Image (cartoon, rainbow, N blue to C red):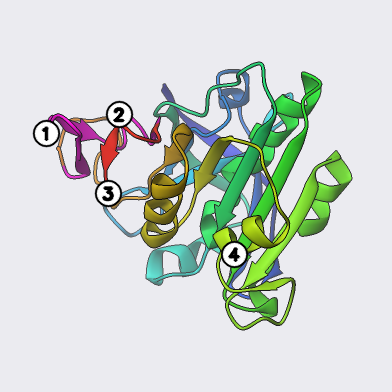
């Protein structure tokens, strides 16, 4: 990990309240799929943890959603930005086909993960869940990579009506190894359905380096795990959700 002032190459809205920012940074050489960076957003004291969407030769792409004053302020940033990272443990790249499941702002870290599995010659099924059509993003980007993509919307405006699991069952996707990131109810449902794979947890973070113990979850042996340091990616049956 290191701290750096990165140059903002672009910062654009790609869906309702969803923004995509590309940063020119040396951290790109160190980053792995599923990791995140901590972003300083003046005048706020605490940094914002944002997952890495794509890793390029000399830049990182992040995707964020406007959820409060901090992320709203990020939409107005166009010159430089203070970051540190890459933080946490990312998704493992195993020698097998994979099912990637993302919900809402849990979708971004799956994109670079998909690139790595495809590069290694594996089939990648992608199931993305959103509330409605206005919130859908990155469907086409996954398709252009070569993934098989299914969409679930809670209101049925696009794809399967219901949850990502409804889409998995409807499309009869049989891949047993799953990597997922998204809201807690989605992760709980996947944990009940699958025994092989990894979950990336979302949590409020203060320090981002495991010192403050503000993002602790428990494993099945009742040991404390720090989402920012030990995670955010954990074996699917390791954590208690």
Residue 217 visible, this orientation = yes
**How many angstroms separate mark 1 from mark 3 (CA)?**
12 Å
Are there few (<14), some (14-19), or many (20+) residues within 10 Å of tag 3? some
Q: Dot 3 corresponds to which residue? A: 241
**Which numbered circle lies on residue 222?**
1
Residues at discs 3 and 4 in contact (Cβ within 8 Å):
no
Q: Residue at x 41, y 21 (%)?
A: 1
Q: Dot 2 corresponds to which residue? A: 229
Residues at discs 2 and 3 in contact (Cβ within 8 Å):
no
Q: Residue at x 31, y 58 (%)?
A: 44
Q: Is residue 226 magenta?
A: yes
In which image quadrant can residue 240 be found?
Answer: top left
Q: Nearer the viewer, mark 2 or mark 3?
A: 3
Q: Nearer the viewer, mark 3 or mark 4?
A: 4
Q: Earlier in the sequence, mark 3 or mark 4?
A: 4
Residues at discs 1 and 4 in contact (Cβ within 8 Å):
no
**How many angstroms separate mark 1 from mark 4 (CA)?**
31 Å
Q: Is residue 235 above or below residue 13?
A: above
Q: Nearer the viewer, mark 1 or mark 4?
A: 4
Would you say 6 lies left or right of 90 here?
A: right
Q: Earlier in the sequence, mark 2 or mark 3?
A: 2
């Amino acid at each position: 990990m290191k701290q750096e002032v990165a140059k903002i190459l672009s910062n654009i809205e790609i869906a309702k309240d969803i923004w995509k920012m590309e940063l020119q940074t040396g951290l790109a050489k160190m980053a792995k799929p599923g990791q995140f960076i901590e972003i300083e957003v003046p005048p706020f004291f605490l940094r914002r943890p944002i997952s890495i969407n794509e890793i390029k030769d000399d830049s990182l792409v992040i995707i964020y959603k406007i959820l409060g004053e901090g992320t709203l302020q990020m939409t107005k940033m166009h010159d430089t930005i203070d970051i540190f990272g890459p933080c946490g443990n990312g998704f493992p790249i195993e020698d097998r086909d994979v099912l990637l499941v993302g919900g809402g702002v849990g979708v971004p870290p799956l994109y670079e993960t998909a690139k790595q599995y495809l590069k290694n010659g594996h089939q990648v099924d992608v199931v993305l869940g959103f509330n409605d059509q206005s919130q859908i993003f990155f469907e086409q980007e996954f398709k252009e990579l070569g993934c098989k993509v299914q969409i679930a919307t809670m209101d049925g405006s696009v794809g399967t009506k219901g949850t990502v699991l409804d889409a998995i069952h409807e499309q009869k996707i049989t891949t047993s190894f799953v990597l997922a990131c998204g809201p807690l109810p989605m992760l709980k449902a996947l944990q009940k359905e699958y025994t092989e794979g990894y979950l990336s947890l979302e949590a409020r973070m203060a320090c981002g380096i495991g010192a403050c113990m503000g993002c602790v979850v428990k494993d099945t042996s009742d040991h404390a795990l720090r989402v920012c340091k030990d995670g955010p990616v954990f074996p699917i049956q390791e954590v208690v959700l």
